[in-house]
Amino acid sequence: MTLLAQLLLAQDKFTISGHVKDASSGEGLIGATIYIEEMKGGGATNDYGFYSLTMPKGKYHIRYSYIGFESTVLTIDLNKNQVHDIEMKILESTLGEVVIKGQADNENIRSAEMGVVKMDIKEIEKIPVLFGEQDIIKTLTLMPGVSSGGEGKGGFYVRGGNTDQNLILLDEAPVYNANHLMGFFSVFNSDALKDIKLYKAGIPAQFGGRLSSVLDVHMKDGNSKKYTVSGGLGLISSRLTIEGPIVKDQGSFIISGRRTYADILLGMVDKDFSDVDLFFYDLNAKANYRIGEKDKVFISGYFGRDKLGTENFGFNWGNTTGTLRWNHIFNNRLFSNTSFIYSSYDYEINVNRSNSDFRITSGIEDYHFKQDFTLFASTNNNIKFGFDVIYHIFKPGELKSFGDTELNNIIIDKKHAFESGLYLSNEQKIGSRIMLEYGIRLSMFNEVGPGTINQYDVNGNIIDEKEYSDLELIQSYLIPEPRFSMSYVLNEQSSLKASYQRNAQYIHLLSAATSDNPTDVWMPSSSVIKPEKANQYSVGYFRNFMDNMFESSIEVYYKDMYDLVDYQDGADVLLNEHVEAELVFGNGRSYGIELLFKKRIGKFTGWVGYTLSKTEHKFDAINNGAWFSARQDRTDDISIVGMYDISNKLSVSATWIYYTGDAVTMPSGQYTIDGNVIPYYTERNGYRMPNYHRLDLGLTLKGKQTKKFQSSWNFSIYNAYARENAYSISFQESETNPEVMEAVQFSLFSIVPSVTWNFKF
């Protein structure tokens, strides 16, 4: 063979591609690792379980691995393009053994990802929670860098950002209020979920629209092998899930519902509560069908509602989402996903009293088109590009009166806007030590008519007014958002990582409360409200121990935030058509250090997470222009989580939480006018709530397991040592001395036991 022929042969490259699935259900496995021993590298499956690797002609040993599943090794002679669909079996282990199939998993060391939290649904099921209702958001707040809204409060904070600065996606559809029952539960029913991933840093370029984080949640596709029914009966809620094939190995569906019945129990205990509404329900539904070898369609939706009220007062709120997706494989290197997405959030308040019957409504509605491409250019380059367009309809609020009510109707004009983005990114491997993920997102926001737009002076007076017709351009913004992450592998057990990201946020949640509230109002950027922007810098050291049984990391971050939105002191929020005149704008900064030590394999698993951080804001119109602590500023935040498998049927778990009290504004003194005591306020958020700590305990007992039926009992104790943590602090006159104001603490919970029976057949 001539030298030229040898060189040409050496350049021959072929592609191996396919899907990686769960053998028991046919579910695609997201992020499954494909490792090529001869090349000391590989890749991973995308959000639909698809992979593609291009390599020179030759013989290879390829290992497929996924946490909780047996590794599969495939030996191939790559002399042409090949398709290999892999079905992986769930890992079975014997008590006392540490089972590791194939090479130990050190993807956390090699990957360029940092500031990323991945949650295992099976792990979440063991963690004790309030009322026994498993909750992914409550579990995420046990990780460093993620803080809860507080006792009985909704929302979560990520690295000093506000709750509205988290993009929450369910099958690509944004969820604008992720809370049930004022924050005691989240809208996510764990029975319907497959994959959960939170980006605190290094947010990929395909995501945009929020400053702090992206919570990307994927629903199960449904079992394509057989029909199953599963669910649970708890003290205040029950769940039921049905899934199965439409055509075996061709298409499947899943329907999962959940409802609380606190109102029914209250009515049984006390007849005075028989007419009280106090419940929520939600429904997840999804179906998929494969059309030929290269096309697959998905349709999914979420429908949830909360109801709270009596005969005279009613309050309800909820989300509706829908996603229609089409996967198409153009060739063995180019994968496409086209999505049509709908999302809506609204609330309604009804008051039915004599001479005062009225209804207040508000909400936001989205129509979203999204086109994503993945080009598996080579084993060392994975290119993603695409675009998306969202049409927002903002409904600031309406008040309508009925009957003889003397109230005047108030209808605040709807606002309309287009939010769009164009992105390009690449995951690149350089040699055996360097992994890069870099790209750019070009985001655009256009506020459009119809509507009347006002301009205000510094005192909030209208100085200009202009009318706009349908789709007439009112205001435009164009912001580039570069993203960069890298890892440098020091050895098989450790690596250094760094990331930078710039994010812009064009829609804003106006809230006068200290936590997420269903009556908060979303508003678009305008000529008055500028887009919020943030730059975040992160570095970290990652180290595994004992053949990757233990993981540890230390991450340091700094975040600059610009054009943040807040209220003037004493602002009027509800049903205010001139609310923009009540707003003030400023900057923020957040910095901290996050420590994580996790045991991921064995009878005993769990983690310890610690965050030391500082978050401050600065507004010219607040606190005399000086920096002040943001309400989500917490100096220390510690979580300790442990789970122990006593036997194949019995496991126990415990969680201990401690964090510094939230920053709050409290009166610094008082003065008296005409006999009335008036509190005197000085600095914004100049005081602290009491420090918070709590211990939760859990026990899971499995019943007899057969091929046709499985069951388990989950017992939990929330707040095991009855700590009276502060929900709120109010001030009132002292009974002994009316001139003295006393602080009064209100606590929600003491010890809360719960029991849930789970089943599957």
Image (tube, rainbow, N blue to C red):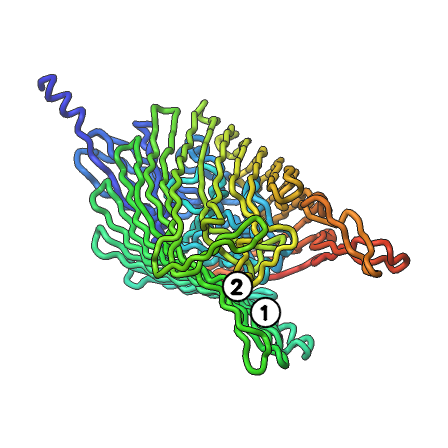
Q: Is residue 82 left or right of residue 755?
A: left
Q: Nearer the viewer, residue 255 or 677?
A: 677
Residue identifier under label 2: 232
The furthest residue to the top: 3
Q: Is residue 476 left or right of residue 670?
A: left
Q: Position of residue 759 (x, y in %)?
A: 50, 62
Q: Is residue 459 left or right of residue 89?
A: right
- Mark 2 or 1: in front is 1
Residue flagged by tag 1: what amino acid is it?
Leu
Task: Indicate which disc residue 440 carries.
Answer: none
Q: Quadrant of the C terminus?
A: bottom left
Q: Position of residue 120 (x, y in %)?
A: 48, 47
Q: Are marks 2 and 1 in contact (CB under 8 Å)?
A: no
* Quadrant assignment, res 513: bottom right
Total residue callouts: 2
The furthest residue to the front: 463
Residue flagged by tag 2: what amino acid is it?
Gly
Identify the residue at image location x=67%, y=59%.
Answer: 753
* Quadrant assignment, res 638: top right
Can see residue 317? yes
Q: Position of residue 584 (x, y in %)?
A: 57, 47
Q: Closer to the N terminus: mark 2 or mark 1?
A: 2
Residue identifier under label 1: 308
Identify the residue at image location x=37%, y=43%.
Answer: 443
Q: Nearer the viewer, residue 121 or 401?
A: 401
Q: Position of residue 163 (x, y in %)?
A: 54, 49
Check disc 2 and report its element: helix, strand or loop. Answer: strand
Q: Is residue 745 left or right of residue 78?
A: right
* Quadrant assignment, res 499: top left
Give the class, few, some or many, for how many residues have Cα within 10 Å of label 1's Cα (few <14, many ≥20).
some
Q: Nearer the viewer, residue 115 or 466?
A: 466
